[in-house]
Amino acid sequence: MSFSVKLWGTRGSIPTPGPSTQKYGGNTACVEIRTDSTLFICDGGTGLRELGIDLMRRHPDGAIVGHMLFSHPHWDHIQGFPFFEPAYRSENLFFIYGTFQGERHIFELLSGQMRLEYFPVDFSELLARLVPAELSPAGTEIDGVTVRAFRQNHPGGSLAFSLVKDGVKIVYATDVELDDLLLDREASLRDPDKPREFPPEWLEFVRGADLLVADGQYTDQEYLNRIGWGHPRATTVVDLAAAAGVSRLLLTHHDPMQDDDSVDRKIAACQERAARLAPGLWVEGAREGMELFVGR
């Protein structure tokens, strides 16, 4: 059994098109995860537009059913939704997650961003069935995949998601200030080389993941001027992956001020740290169009 994972948007905060970002891409957060015939979409940044075009190409005659997992409603995670072509086709069905029982926050904000003040096309013109759906903190089974949501530390709040089937585990955890949760936060800022320690609930959520797709927005130096902005040092994510026994780490949500060369240097520093802390841990930078197969 295996998952396929494809990156459609890897940038954080704001789209950054142009010649200096061609390698890693300029579209904001969107990840496609498939297992068997089930489609999961993590976040709906501007990368969602291109995913929608591709889905229409793949399904010219049949209905598309998808499960959309929104980490939170900041613009860079929902701004592609009004341009998602499958949402305008009546034969399609999308379940919209990102809330726990009794909440409709994500669904209401998705529709709210299509008010006339912000966008010329009204939410009512989306012809697909769009169903607000709930996730249980203990885990919700969707077509044999156990999906669990986990509350994160981010301004306004955000959710991480884990997807598990037949012992294969993927974790998607973006927009979280891991450094603010460290048990040794001040010591790690004074001595960045020191391995960082994490709360047990975080280690348990990530533990044993075959693939961790995670926010790695800042370098160590950048983070010092952005404490409280809701994103981690990329090297802190390496420490989490090492401590939790993760097999592969894919760092995403690259800062809009980082060109391709800057991201290269950030990833190289993370790979060097991984080699020291957890030899065998695979670390790469997320690139638009990148596709991975995750299984055992």
Image (spheres, rainbow, N blue to C red):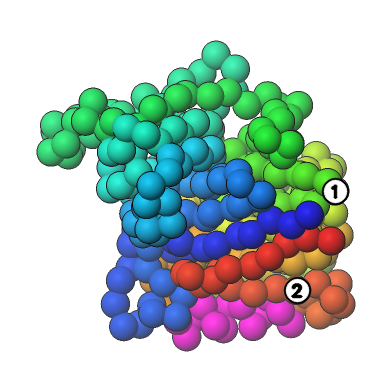
Please tell me whether mark 2 sits on a helix, a strand or a loop. Answer: strand
How many numbered marks are there?
A: 2
Q: Position of residue 288 (x, y in %)?
A: 47, 69
The verdict on residue 252 being magenta is: no
Please name the residue that numbered disc 2 is placed on: 282
Could you tell me how far apart the alpha carbons at marks 2 and 1 are, in whole angstroms? 19 Å
Mark whose residue sits in front, 2 or 1? 1
CB within 8 Å, label 2 to label 1 = no
Quadrant where the C terminus is found in the figure: bottom right
Please tell me whether mark 1 sits on a helix, a strand or a loop. Answer: loop
Query: Residue 239: which quarter of the image?
Result: bottom right
Q: Position of residue 47 (x, y in %)?
A: 39, 58
Classify residue 152 as left or right of residue 43: right
Please name the residue that numbered disc 1 is placed on: 167
| 246 is higher (above) or lower (below) than 83 | below
| Extent of the magenta region | 260-272
Question: Which of disc 1 and disc 2 is earlier in sequence?
Answer: 1
Mark 2 is surrounded, within 10 Å at the Cα level, by few (under 14), some (14 to 19) or many (20 or more) other residues, namely some
Q: Amino acid at mark 2?
A: Trp
Quadrant where the N terminus is found in the figure: bottom right
Residue ID at (21%, 30%): 125
Q: Position of residue 260 (x, y in %)?
A: 45, 81
Q: Which mark is residue 68?
A: none
| 106 is higher (above) or lower (below) than 86 | above
Residue 187 makes an appearance in the image: no
Q: Residue furthest top?
A: 102
Q: Position of residue 97 (x, y in %)?
A: 53, 31
